Image: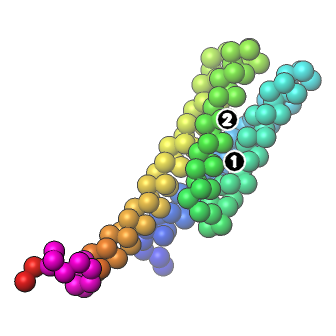
Amino acid sequence: MEDSQNTGTVAKDYSFQILQKVEDMMVYAYPIVMRWSVAEKYAIGNDLMDCMKKMLRLAVDIAEKYYKKTTLGDFDRENKTLQKYIKVAYRIRVLKGISSYKEWTNRSEEIGRMLGGYINTVNGENSVAENTATQQRKSSGYGNGRYKRH
């Protein structure tokens, strides 16, 4: 049984939860968008769904470890773009009612918070490795000799 304190396990949990939240958001949004008029679907519904599809692809990449830091940035950017589309949909009254707007926004913000935690976890793992390598170089005596203590 894996140790739950292992950062690899924590990262895997984050990435799986993010993927699940994106799937849940799509399952929530799709029937709503399908009830909109044809004009509303094409005006903004397709853009909303396209953002969520891109987020799903990026979430799969993150969950399966097929990513670099740029993938995390791309995911964050798509989520922020989705939030802007949600706001526009509310302002042009495609999303009817403040409760609908809040539900969509809360789902997207929750994914954003989870992604932020995941990014901190990934950066924390990299920082530990980088700090260890830097400390080893400093203690090895290599480099400019005039700064070494005698």
Seen from this angle, which residue lies furthest left? 150
Front-most of residues 56 and 81: 81
| Left-right relation of 16 to 40 | left
| Left-right relation of 139 to 129 | left
Q: Residue at x 49, y 48 (%)?
A: 116
Q: Are marks 2 and 1 in contact (CB under 8 Å)?
A: yes
Amino acid on which disc 2 is placed: Leu
User: Does residue 142 belong to the magenta stretch?
Assistant: yes
Q: Residue at x 49, y 54 (%)?
A: 119
Residue 146 versus residue 50 in the image, above or below: below
Magenta highlight range:
138-148
Front-most of residues 84 and 13: 84
Amino acid on which disc 1 is placed: Met
Q: Position of residue 32 (x, y in %)?
A: 79, 29
Mark 2 element type: helix
Q: Residue at x 75, y 34 (%)?
A: 48
Q: Which numbered dot is residue 82?
A: 2
| Left-right relation of 41 to 110 | right
Residue 38 falls in image quadrant: top right
Residue 61 versus residue 117 in the image, above or below: below
Q: Position of residue 16 (x, y in %)?
A: 60, 59
Q: How many marks?
A: 2
Q: Position of residue 11 (x, y in %)?
A: 50, 63
Residue 59 versus residue 140 in the image, above or below: above
| Left-right relation of 128 to 24 | left
Q: Which residue is mark 1?
A: 55
Residue 52 falls in image quadrant: top right
